[in-house]
Each structure stands twice: as structure tokens, then as C-alpha cells.
Image (cartoon, rainbow, N blue to C red):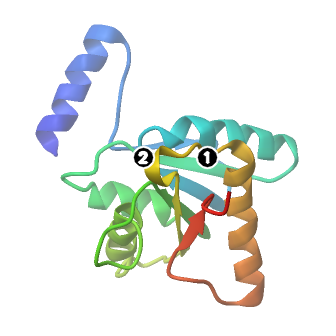
């Protein structure tokens, strides 16, 4: 972990582009955040911008480092939010949900502040996940909160 952060710091000095294990986008006043890794982050940023234009204060937390998992960074970041909507691009075979959500649920288990954590599986087999489906993830989670219960994970975009 420390070596990776040191190399990222050196890279930032050389290029002006800096990276951290966990990055936030438009989270200052958000109660609910999407959590993504990799290619999902761009479309989720676009969706966050559109949702904010429509008066919904959501944000994005991007996990840039998966192994070693940045436990302390994830806890200190996610403990600030009421709802965490994790979007995984794969299932973890033999597990209940996607690998990122399983890791996040595990590290947040003993945290002093526990957000509601939702796991969404989207984009299987390379399927596109357009902004309207990302917004739908938010609405699915908010509906589940109103009903007071939610699933271990939700599949998105497989009924086309």
C-alpha cells in the first residue's frame, strides 16, 4: 500500500496527475454515494452531474486500489454517508454479491458509523450501462429503503 502511494506521489510530481486509493466526486453535501471502480466511474460521474441538475444530491466514491484493499481509506470515506450504492461489474462466484461490495461490507462491519450498503451487479458480459440505468440504481435503493428491506444484491440490465 505505502509503496503504491509513494509511486503515485512521484508520478504526480512528474506529470501533475495525482492519484489516491479512494477518490471522491461531488460528495460534499451528499447523503448517498455510488461506489465504483474502473470504467464505470466515467458514466457515473456523468449521471451524478445530471442527477444534481435535477436536485438530487448524490456523489461518487471511486476505488482506485483494490489490492491491497485500502481499508482505512474506505472506512474514513464511507462512514460520512447514509447510503452507499456499490456497483460491481462481476459476480464473485460462491459469494453473495460482487467482490467490491463484499469487501466494503466486510470493512464497514465494525465501523462506528454504518451506512446502508446496496450491491448492484451491472454490465455483465461487457454490456453498456447507460446513465438512465445508473439513475435507476439510485431509485431502486431509495424504494428499498422506504420499504425497509433490500436484497443481498440486484442485477441491472439483464432483461433486454
Q: Residues within 10 Å of mark 2 (few under 14, many from 20)?
A: some
Q: Which mark is residue 114?
A: none
State whether residue 139 is above or below residue 22.
below
Q: Is residue 152 left or right of residue 139?
A: left
Quadrant in the picture for residue 43:
top right
State if disc 2 and disc 1 touch (CB < 8 Å): no
Residue labelled with disc 2: 37
State whether residue 2 is above or below residue 135.
above
**In the rendered image, is residue 36 in sight?**
yes
Mark 1 against mark 2, which lies toward the viewer? 1
Q: Position of residue 74 (x, y in %)?
A: 38, 58
Q: Nearer the viewer, residue 21 or 67?
A: 67
Q: Residue furthest bottom?
A: 148
Query: In the image, what residue occupies the spot 25% across and 18% down?
Result: 11
Q: Secondary structure at mark 1?
A: loop
Q: Position of residue 129 (x, y in %)?
A: 61, 46
**In the rendered image, is residue 29 in sight?**
no
Q: Which mark is residue 129?
A: 1
Decide which of tag 1 and tag 2 comes sooner along the chain.
2
Q: Position of residue 104 (x, y in %)?
A: 38, 67
Query: In the image, what residue occupies the spot 77% across and 76% down?
Result: 143
Q: Residue furthest top?
A: 14
State whether residue 48 is above or below residue 89.
above
Q: Is residue 91 left or right of residue 24?
A: left
Q: Measure how far apart labels 1 and 2 are at the Cα level.
A: 14 Å
Q: Nearer the viewer, residue 124 or 99?
A: 124
Q: Is residue 76 left or right of residue 28?
A: left
Q: Position of residue 31 (x, y in %)?
A: 67, 62
Amino acid at each position: 500500500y505505502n509503496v503504491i502511494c509513494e509511486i503515485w506521489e512521484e508520478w504526480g510530481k512528474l506529470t501533475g496527475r495525482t492519484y489516491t486509493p479512494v477518490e471522491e466526486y461531488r460528495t460534499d453535501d451528499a447523503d448517498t454515494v455510488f461506489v465504483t471502480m474502473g470504467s464505470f466511474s466515467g458514466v457515473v460521474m456523468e449521471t451524478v452531474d445530471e442527477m444534481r441538475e435535477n436536485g438530487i444530491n448524490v456523489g461518487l466514491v471511486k476505488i482506485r486500489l483494490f489490492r491491497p484493499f485500502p481499508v482505512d481509506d474506505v472506512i474514513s470515506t464511507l462512514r460520512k454517508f447514509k447510503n452507499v450504492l456499490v456497483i460491481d461489474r462481476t459476480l464473485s462466484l460462491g459469494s453473495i454479491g460482487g467482490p467490491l461490495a463484499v469487501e466494503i461490507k466486510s470493512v464497514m462491519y465494525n465501523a462506528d458509523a454504518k451506512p446502508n450498503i446496496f450491491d448492484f451487479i451491472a454490465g455483465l458480459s461487457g454490456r453498456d450501462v447507460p446513465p438512465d440505468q445508473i439513475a435507476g440504481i439510485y431509485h431502486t435503493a431509495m424504494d428499498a429503503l422506504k420499504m425497509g428491506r433490500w436484497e443481498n444484491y440486484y442485477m441491472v440490465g439483464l432483461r433486454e
